[in-house]
Image: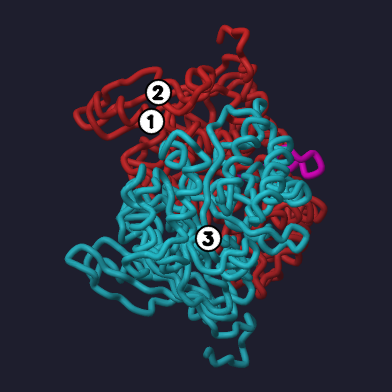
Chain colours: A red, B cyan
Amino acid sequence: MLQRTAESTLALSGQRFHVTYRLVGDVREAEARAREISIEQTVEFPESLIHSPEIREHIIGRLESIQVVDAAHCDVTISYAVETSGFELTQLLNVIFGNTSLQPNVRVVNVALPDALLQALHGPRFGQAGLRALLGVPKRPLLCTAIKPMGLSPKALAELTYALALGGVDIIKDDHGLADQPFARFRERVERCAEAVARANQQTGYRCVYAPNVSANGEQTLENARFAKQAGAGALLIAPGLVSFGLMAQIAADDTIGLPILGHPAFLGGFVAHPSGGIAHSVLFGLFMRLAGADATIFPNYGGRFAFSREACESIAHAARAPLGALKPIFPTPAGGMTLARVPEMRSVYGDDVILLIGGGLHSAGPDLLSNCRRFREMAESELVHPASA
Amino acid sequence: MLQRTAESTLALSGQRFHVTYRLVGDVREAEARAREISIEQTVEFPESLIHSPEIREHIIGRLESIQVVDAAHCDVTISYAVETSGFELTQLLNVIFGNTSLQPNVRVVNVALPDALLQALHGPRFGQAGLRALLGVPKRPLLCTAIKPMGLSPKALAELTYALALGGVDIIKDDHGLADQPFARFRERVERCAEAVARANQQTGYRCVYAPNVSANGEQTLENARFAKQAGAGALLIAPGLVSFGLMAQIAADDTIGLPILGHPAFLGGFVAHPSGGIAHSVLFGLFMRLAGADATIFPNYGGRFAFSREACESIAHAARAPLGALKPIFPTPAGGMTLARVPEMRSVYGDDVILLIGGGLHSAGPDLLSNCRRFREMAESELVHPASA
């Protein structure tokens, strides 16, 4: 803890959060770069011109450690006073990587937050246990699919939704490309699809939910979320890369909305498309999604249409479920070109605390969509030969 | 224009927008990748399962051209129906690069929007001419600085603001790291700094404005902007990487706020930190900032603390000012470690329709801040030996 002196004007608690950056270079280069980052992310001002010893000692980031990773890389850990974040997610992200994101050859590989900060951030409203309770599914993997393609009318999308719900899928989400297009207006789509799910649930006795994509400009996202709630949607799809992590956090914390959130990775790729820069998969899709209130984090699974490695995917799943103060664990949701054939492998890699998201693959698995859905469900309900390794 | 047939149910206008992606690979590889992108960004569904010919022909992106760039790269241009964007910025960004941002070796290098889309997006409220009129500066470069370091009290920041305004700086912005921290609360800071600028303006007769950083979680950003307006702030600093382009656009379009916006690049770096992926500097910091309503786009100048090339910086300046339907041209605002010594060079590279942003360099230029500011102003007012090359 910081010893407060008589001259203290900042009233800092002494609690700090830690960010580990992976830098290209040897120890000497890494130390020099770390000093630059610790200034860039805080005071952005020549240290020699700062007269306050408190600012120099406690506001400027503090270099805590340097570790050699390999011949070309070092990890430096810098701590920041929790107060620099204003105890708010948007500013926390700004201190972690705001300006430094514009630099090459620096990657955020770990972020460790003390309880004082975690308590201020709330995180997911439902988490794994809450979402399981809502859906009435205590143990098996949850089943998710997406309605598409873009271009279908609200009526056609609702018919599709009805069939998918009858087939026993737990969560039917909008494809993230469905917005408020002239050929499928948001409000009509949400009303029709929510109604379709309710009608199917009456027949099946299941508790399927519909998750419309509410991502839009600023306050429109909130308005969409409120409309979705009122129209009977049971969850929300939000892409924080498009609408911001802070706005998603606000929706998660809003008691008048109170719906589970599926976090979608659209427009976040810049941070992970190159290994020498950006933000580690576990931090971006695990930690940040969870801090911002996602109950499930959708990410491109390895071996699908995208190029994430198995190791990166497993690191996301780990971060989604690892202890994090009082914040609830959330569901890893591997997706992107998945098929029924991949279900046993996904269960074996991620364990059963997972959401299996299959979109197009549910349609191409056989001529009858309803039986494809039922097969999907059976595959999630059956005992795995290889026990879960999560 | 699309020939509408009797079966048309989508009522598409036939207008399309064009996105050029730079891909790693030869022509054959590029063509295959382009087909994948045109599906990924729209229907995300196996083409063979799409029964509607209209969706197949008009909703799926259309490969318009392939150009060989060099031995390792091709540019592919894909057009999308304007309707896929819902005529809204957030969804437009989603169609341009939502999921594909998660792929390696693909970079958005150009975006061309038809009038139908530009008209829906509004863009900057003031633009270059409007901001010049507001500040009463018809011709010379505008002068901008930032108050810092983080850790100063609102009172100390206001004293600094007063001195900078007396010295003749046109725009005094918050450092982007100033948020709502316990040691400098947003509201007290904004009130004190706005008052300091007003007091200085009374003495000088200048029309300096104070631009607080309003970036925060979701609606809090809007609330901060409204508070800033009411407290007498003359402009706003917004980081769309933190709060989203869509929210910034909403603030720009809000008549009850009606203040010029300085767009800040924090947390956008993932898209530009690597040349083989992400989004071209001109598109991200030029076009997207302008579409989202920034009147000035702040970016790290070459030869400062960051690693942008001169060519990249010039491309941003070009995109900030190039014809774009009825959207106003905006000010390129090169920054990041600039000094007084760089002023003649910056004027010569960017021309005089530029905002010169010098932060720490204004303090280190000499012992007396007031005279440093006056020298800054004289350097911007003097005739350049080399005429502007913009």
Label 3 – label 1 distance at C-alpha = 28 Å
Residue nearest the observer in this picture, A88 or A333:
A88
Which chain is disc 3 placed on? B
Answer yes or no: do the residues labelled 3 and 1 have beta carbons within 8 Å?
Answer: no
Which chain is disc 2 placed on? A
Residue B24 placement (x, y as % from top left):
26, 61
Type of the residue with mark 3: Met
Marks 2 and 1: same chain?
A: yes
- SS class of the residue under badge 2? strand
Bin the neighbour count of mark 2 within 10 Å (Cα to Cα): few under 14, some 14-19, many 20 and up: many
User: What residue is pinned by disc 1?
Assistant: A21
User: What residue is pinned by disc 3?
Assistant: B289
Q: Is residue A253 magenta?
A: yes
Q: Which mark is residue A77?
A: 2
- Taking B344 as reference, is A349 above or below it? above
State the image quarter where residue B181 is shown. top right
Which stretch is magenta?
A: A251-262
Comparing labels 2 and 3, the label whose residue is closer to the camera: 3
Q: Earlier in the sequence, mark 2 or mark 1?
A: 1
Type of the residue with mark 1: Tyr
Q: Residue at x 78, y 59 (%)?
A: B256
Residue nearest the observer in this picture, A302 or B236:
B236
Residue B124 placement (x, y as % from top left):
60, 66
Bin the neighbour count of mark 3 within 10 Å (Cα to Cα): few under 14, some 14-19, many 20 and up: many
